[in-house]
Image (cartoon, rainbow, N blue to C red):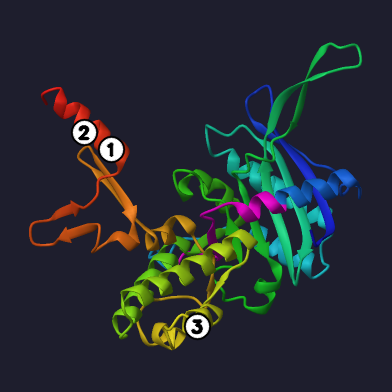
Amino acid sequence: MTINIETAIIHAIVAQNDGKLACRLRPQPLKDSQALTHTIEELHRIYTAKPGKGYGFFGLPESETDTAAEVNTDFKEALAAYRQNQLGFVEFSSKAGELLQNELAKYDFAQGGFLLLSSYSHLADDYLFVALLSAKQSLTVNDDMELRQNDHLDLANLQLAARVNLSEWDADPQSRKYISFVKGRAGRKVADFFLDFMGCSEGLNVKAQNKSLMVAVEDCVAATELDKEERQQVREVLFDYCSDKVDQGSSVKLPELSEQLAQAGLDSFYDFTNAGEYGLEDEFDGDKATLRQLKKFAGSGGGVSISFDASHLGERVVYNTIHDTLTIKGVPPNLKDQLLRRLKGGD
């Protein structure tokens, strides 16, 4: 893995006897070691593979209508001072630790953890990685063949983490997507305090971008004379391209995608999106869960769940829009067996 670690540090945010949180600051960066390299590389791998990440920037969301609203700029200013060599990394990280402690103190559920910050480069970009890690207990066997309980950092369960693309921030301060962050299972609200301590607001909705991409492709396809098989081929190319980008940890690039679609018979897709009101960025992350609708239709409600390959629509599966019914030709054998057994029972 082509990661060049510049520096890294860990601070502990712990609960005191009185229930209040305190920040134990490490006075120097972590020593360069194989353990550090492995940890940062593993965190980079896990983070990159996380699906459904959010994207944002330092500042207030564009939808903010309260003119009196303020955003916490302390993290941004400290990071900028570090980047301009006005603050050392230890001083910057200590400031970050204190900011997170103060933010956590606002919540009853706060239990602290280990704040890890690392400045590193990957490929052509410089990053700042920020994560609040928890400890997890495990069992091992010592030399005397006795069970021993150990605590270790739970890297696999990475839930509170963000990454600032420093290169993009430098090149385009007006960008709305130079910060990425892990979204909680219940949406952004799970990680609100983590983003608030950084002064970060969501600026690019990846799912919405992927949905708009699918709408744009369908609209563009509808405006062509491609037959059914050719249209499905376009959808396959779109899904495969985006899936490959997700697997590689890369972004979907509209100009590049347009070239791929042109080879499948869909010309001038990039120009088509720019002429329409799709709100697509030139570059954004793919979302497999959203794009899977290109290959499969699925839905549930009222005790009924249905899913089928998109290629069957109009052939094995026919939708009557007037009567709002689906006709399935050729019932799957395992389902057919269940139905026949139930009918024999007199139901």
User: Which SS class for mark 3?
Assistant: helix
* Residues at circles 2 and 1 in contact by the CB criterion of under 8 Å: yes
Q: Quadrant of the C terminus?
A: top left
User: Does residue 296 appear left or right of residue 49 in this picture?
Assistant: left
Q: CA distance from mark 2 to mark 1?
A: 6 Å
Residue drawn at 51 percent across, 66 percent down: 240
Residue 154: say if magenta. no
- Pointer 1 local density, CA inside 10 Å: few below 14, some 14–19, many at least 20: few
Examine the rendering and report whether any part of residue 216 can be seen: no
Disc 3 target residue:
263
Residue at the extreme left: 323
Residue 26 in percent (x, y) is at 83, 42
Residue drawn at 82 percent across, 62 percent down: 87
Disc 2 target residue:
339
Residue 326 in percent (x, y) is at 17, 53
Q: CA distance from mark 2 to mark 3?
A: 45 Å
Up/down of 234 relative to 144, above or below: below
Examine the rendering and report whether any part of residue 120 can be seen: yes
Disc 1 target residue:
335
Mark 3: which amino acid? Gln
- Residue 58 bears which disc, if any? none
Q: Earlier in the sequence, mark 3 or mark 1?
A: 3
Up/down of 114 relative to 277, above or below: above
Up/down of 200 relative to 231, above or below: above
* Residues at circles 3 and 1 in contact by the CB criterion of under 8 Å: no
From which residue to which does the magenta span run?
A: 44-61
- Pointer 3 local density, CA inside 10 Å: few below 14, some 14–19, many at least 20: few
Mark 1: which amino acid? Leu
User: Which SS class for mark 1?
Assistant: helix
User: Does residue 243 appear left or right of residue 343 in this picture?
Assistant: right
User: Does residue 100 appear left or right of residue 343 in this picture?
Assistant: right
Residue 48: say if magenta. yes
